[in-house]
Structure formats: C-alpha cells, structure tokens
Image (cartoon, grey):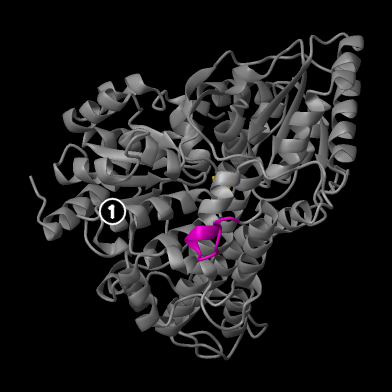
C-alpha cells in the first residue's frame, strides 16, 4: 500500500521496511502515515496546563479567541515552547549529571571499572574554569573539577562555571538580558513554575526564561556530559568508522546498544571482548560477538572508538526486522516504545538498563556503575542464548558506508593548525580570505513526517557546494555518513574554496563531532573562533548558522534555543510550534536578534533551508567587512 522509498532515502531502511511489511509488522513510518498530526496542536494553539480546558484556539485566526483563563495565543505558545525547553534541558542535564556521578565515584576510588583516561583533557577543562593545575596531582584537580561542575546543577545564585568559556561580549549581552543561567535545576524548576496556570503571562518574559534554561543545557548539562565523557573515556580523534546495517553479521552474536549515556556502551565493549564470553559464543556455534551502536550513544562510540553504527532514530525499529539482532540494550532517550513490540515479533532480547527508563515488555537488567559488568555480561549471555535459537530468517542489507568520524573542537584546531601551531587561526584565516564562507552545524533527529535522511543530506550538500564547512552530530551525522559525505573525496562535491582547504588538509567537507550532547563542541568551537580574532567580538558576529532539518524531540528545541540564545541563526525543518504572524513567533524569528542574540528560522525545503543559512552567513561576512 505504501511506496517505502517515499518514507526514506536510506536503502537499508527501505529494504527492511519491505521485509517488515511482508512479515506483517508495522513501524513508526506507517503509524505516522496513519495518524495525521493534530492541526491545532501542531501550531501550538492548544493549552492543557489546567483542567478548565484543554483549550483550543483557532490557528487560522489566532487572536480571535483566548483560553478560559484569558490566555492569548502568545502566552499559550510561549508556555508550550518553554515546557519543551525545560524537558529537553532536563534530559541533557540529567545525562550530564549521571556522567558527573560516575566521575565523582571514579575520583573517590569507588568505581574501578572506569578511570581518568585523558589527563590532558582534565587539565584543559579545569584550567578553562580557573582551577589551578600546575604541580598538582590528578586526583586533586579532578576533585576540584567535580565540585565546580556540580554547581552547573545545584547552584541557586550566580553563574554556571562554563560561562567562563563564553566570549566576554556574549556574556555581557546575557547579563544585560538577565539570562545567564544560575543552575539548571533552578532554571528548570522556574520554567515549570512560571508555566503553571496563572503565573507568567507575558510571552517576552517566558522566552527570557527559555533562553536562561536553554543556556543551562548548552553551556551546562550538555557540555558537562561531553567534557566528562572525554576525560573518562578519551577525547575523540579522527578515525575510519563504518555505518549502516551491513555491519550486522549473520554468523555472529549481534548486540546493539541504543540510547545516550556512554558508560553502558563502554562496559558492553569490555563484555563482548571478554574471552570467556567469546568462547561461549563460539560454543553456541557463532564466529564471535559483534557489537554495534544506534542513535546518539552509537554516534559517541563511533567517534571515540570506531564501533560501527547501524542506524539513526528512524532506523531503530527496522534494524530488528533483519532478524539478526540477538540483543538490544537501551538506557535513556529516543527509544521508541514500539521497539518492544518489534523485538517480540523477531525474538530479539530487549533490555532496559536504566532505573529512569523501563518499557513494558522489556526485561529490566539494571546497570550499576559500581558493578557495570553484572549487567552487560548478562545481556551478552542472553544474546548468545537467542543466537542458539534464532527463530526466523535473517536478512541483512549489505550496505556498509565508511567515513571519517571523531572530530573534536580540539582536533579541528590541531588539524588545521598542525602540531606546531595548533589553533583556530587557519580556520579563521580561511573564513576571512573567503575560501570557507562560514560554518554550519547541521544536527538533530530524523522524523517520519519527512522523507528520512533526505532533508539532512540535501541541505548539507547545498551548504558545502556553497563553500560552507559543515559540522555534524547525532542522527544527522549518520545520515550524511550513509550518503558518503564523511570521506575526504566528498570534497569533489564542495565549492572550489572549501574543496581546496579539504584537499590541503586531507579532511572531509563534513566533520562528525559525535552525539547530540556534543553539540556543545560547536559552542566551544564558536567561542574559539571569537577568541582567535578577526571574526568579531561575540558569537552573534560569526558567519555561522545551525539547522535541525528533521527534528522531532524536545531536546532539539532546547538545543535550537541555546544556539539562538548564544547568538546563532538556527533553522528548523518539518514544522515549527508557533504561528507565523503572532507576536511570540516574531520575537523568536526577529526580536531576539535585535536584542543581541541569534534568531530562529524555518524552512521545509532543504535548498531553501541552506540558502537561508547562507544568506545569514553572508550578512555576517558583510558586517565584518570580509565580503567577496
Ligand atoms: Ni539528538 Fe534527536 Fe535522539 Fe540523538 Fe537522534 S533523535 S535531538 S540525534 S538519537 S538525541
């Protein structure tokens, strides 16, 4: 009944959609096709924050009515938006806090399975927030760093620690606007309070708190997650890595880790390499154990260790349809409940591991950082059991796409500057001389409301064709990796200037930075570009833009808004939860820029999206006097 090519441009996904359909199994693609979005909700014109409603305004005539309490469309849409920011920020900061918990226990010697792998990074991060490092023991520095970073969450007054990394001019704007985050718990609590019935009913004031909270995500929780993960598990360096479903192996026990917090994955790597478990797998008739990733934790270990990645958000269900997945272990975020049904259909062992996220129908094997292997070994053992009794036919799409992954903001400096003079000077110089027009961060989810991967791929192609260097994370990075753009020879698709830089340095025109929390690497790169000089004094001066072409999650809104509050122009695709022409919409799309921040943009069409970003980059170049 459906043409699956309309659903996805990913060959492997299409092939598995066909198989699933033949097996009588449906996925989020079909569910989306059958469930049209609510036209009122899609425009954020409904309010269900109290039980006098739920109230529905008319998106076609948004000022014609108000809610029972008198709330206008601007209040309603701003409150809905604020709660998305709060939820997205909470997800990233809770993830960051888990990493910080692990870090504390490692430093105190109570966790033996992980250690501080990257002492150099520990020192740089500590120094960046004013912690003395010269002549001090690693443990002393680490303890100080822990206590400082804890303030990111628990502080009730003052500024979160990583504000010290923000260019002074940008911080000045934030202080003037009253949006420097104090601590994420406080900011999230305040949003929840202010969006309760009868509290904050001025969209401008609500948006102010959105900015403060989103900044507590980008320069707070997300950045802590990235930096602590680098310190514990190593800062990524470019490596050749593979993506796509062809990395499942029919003759191996296949284990997938899916979710967001890297500790589960790190321990699973140890488990699958344990000789005793490998032996067990062989006794069961398998050639070995094959570990692969999905979604953001997959993107993270792809960057850090080169573990193959089999699919982004819209491929997670169909991967199971291969019949080859013996076990899937998940932790938190972006895990469809539909996976549980899918796993049942194909006999895949499906495990939740995090006390925060259980799923009906999934077996829960709790992961404890103090004894992580008790969880991961068990998952592997049960995967071996399933391998022995694979119930159905195994069909693995034979697509394997190689590319370079694992760029970090540190490595960008090293790569362009060389060991001798590692810095952002060459990047800035190439932007000033016009070989590189600007920088674009293309990130975020995939969403069945648009053709899977297509918008990501087309927007990035158009950007590099116009000499815009692209940095990527998360599901978007995987889409482009599948399209082959993470290889140095993809430079042939770039404009002359960008191609020349890529050829000289030997880098691809599209750089993968890792998972969604690693969007914080983009913020640090922007801060470095400002510090290096020649491109203005604040992040808002930079010829840089962001996009989430196929977004779907509340986290994406929080990310988009911290990009905007940091000074960047950020374009979203699919749809936008605000009505054009309303005051709230105008504030997000124009007003914030007048206040010295960035602004939101929207386009469904990828080429239009790319050109919105390019025009913005050109506008910034002109203001800097570096046109032509
Ligand atoms: Ni980020 Fe979206 Fe999820 Fe990762 Fe993928 S869906 S906002 S990219 S896995 S968090």
> Which residue is painted at 74% across and 30% down in the image?
269
Magenta includes 134? yes
Asked whether 611 or 433 is in front, the reply is: 433
Q: Quadrant of residue 172?
A: bottom left
Magenta extent: 126-135
> Which residue is painted at 43% across and 45% down in the image?
409
In the depicted structure, whether residue 394 falls above or below residue 417: above
Residue at the disc numbered 1: 532
Q: Could you say where residue 355 lies in the image, as x and y percent from the top left?
A: 83, 55
Identify the residue at the far left of this view.
628
How many residues crowd mark 1 within 10 Å: few (<14), some (14–19), many (20+)?
A: some
In the depicted structure, whether residue 83 falls above or below residue 203: above
Most common secondary structure along the magenta stretch: loop
- Left or right placement of residue 294 versus residue 540 in this view: right
Is residue 73 shown to the viewer in this render?
no
In the depicted structure, whether residue 208 falls above or below residue 401: below
């Amino acid at each position: 009944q459906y043409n699956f090519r309309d659903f996805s441009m990913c060959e492997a996904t299409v092939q598995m959609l066909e198989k699933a359909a033949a097996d009588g199994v449906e996925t989020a693609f079909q569910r989306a096709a059958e469930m049209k979005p609510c036209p009122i909700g899609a425009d954020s014109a409904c309010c269900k924050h109290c039980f006098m409603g739920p109230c529905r305004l008319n998106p076609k005539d948004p000022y014609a009515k108000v809610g029972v309490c008198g709330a206008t469309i601007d209040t309603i849409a701003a409150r809905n938006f604020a709660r998305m920011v709060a939820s997205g920020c909470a997800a990233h900061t809770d993830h960051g806090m888990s990493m910080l918990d692990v870090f504390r226990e490692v430093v105190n010697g109570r966790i033996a399975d992980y250690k501080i792998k990257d002492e150099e990074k520990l020192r740089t991060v500590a120094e960046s927030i004013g912690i003395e490092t010269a002549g001090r023991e690693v443990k002393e520095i680490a303890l100080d760093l822990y206590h400082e970073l804890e303030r990111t969450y628990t502080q009730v007054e003052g500024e979160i620690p990583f504000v010290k990394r923000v260019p002074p001019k940008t911080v000045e704007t934030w202080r003037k606007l009253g949006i420097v985050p104090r601590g994420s718990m406080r900011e999230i609590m305040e949003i929840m309070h202010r969006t309760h019935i009868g509290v904050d009913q001025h969209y401008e004031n609500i948006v102010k708190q959105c900015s403060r909270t989103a900044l507590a995500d980008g320069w707070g929780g997300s950045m802590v997650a990235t930096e602590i993960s680098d310190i514990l598990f190593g800062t990524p360096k470019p490596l050749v890595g593979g993506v796509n479903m062809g990395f499942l192996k029919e003759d191996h026990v296949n284990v997938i880790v899916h979710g967001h917090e890297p500790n589960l994955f790190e321990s699973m790597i140890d488990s699958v390499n344990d000789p005793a478990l490998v032996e067990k797998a062989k006794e069961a008739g398998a050639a070995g154990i094959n570990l692969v990733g999905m979604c953001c934790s997959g993107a993270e270990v792809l960057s850090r260790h080169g573990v193959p990645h089999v699919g982004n958000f819209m491929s997670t269900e169909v991967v199971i349809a291969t019949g080859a997945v013996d076990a899937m272990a998940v932790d938190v975020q972006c895990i469809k409940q539909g996976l549980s049904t899918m796993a049942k259909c194909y006999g895949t062992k499906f495990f939740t591991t995090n006390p925060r996220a259980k799923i009906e129908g999934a077996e829960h094997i709790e992961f404890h950082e103090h004894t992580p292997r008790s969880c991961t070994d068990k998952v592997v053992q049960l995967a071996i059991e399933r391998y022995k009794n694979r119930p159905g036919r195994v069909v693995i799409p034979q697509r394997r796409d190689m590319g370079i992954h694992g760029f970090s903001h540190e490595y960008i400096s090293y790569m362009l500057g060389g060991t001798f003079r590692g810095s952002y000077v060459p990047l800035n110089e190439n932007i000033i001389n016009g070989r590189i027009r600007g920088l674009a961060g293309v990130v975020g989810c995939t969403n069945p409301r648009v053709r899977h991967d297509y918008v990501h791929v087309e927007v990035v192609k158009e950007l590099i064709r116009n000499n815009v260097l692209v940095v990527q994370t998360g599901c978007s990075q995987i889409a482009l990796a599948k399209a082959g753009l993470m290889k140095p020879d993809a430079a042939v698709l770039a404009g002359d200037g960008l191609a020349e830089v890529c050829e000289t340095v030997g880098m691809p025109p599209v750089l993968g930075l890792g998972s969604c929390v690693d969007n914080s690497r983009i913020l640090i790169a922007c801060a470095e570009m400002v510090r290096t000089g020649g491109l203005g004094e604040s992040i808002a001066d930079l010829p840089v833009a962001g996009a989430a072409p196929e977004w779907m999650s509340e986290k994406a809104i929080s990310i988009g808004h911290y990009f905007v509050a940091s000074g960047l122009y950020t374009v979203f695709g699919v749809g936008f939860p605000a009505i054009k022409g309303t005051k709230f919409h105008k504030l997000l799309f124009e007003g914030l820029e007048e206040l010295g921040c960035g602004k939101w943009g929207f386009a469904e069409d990828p080429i239009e999206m790319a050109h919105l970003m390019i025009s913005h980059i050109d506008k910034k170049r002109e203001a800097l006097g570096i046109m032509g």
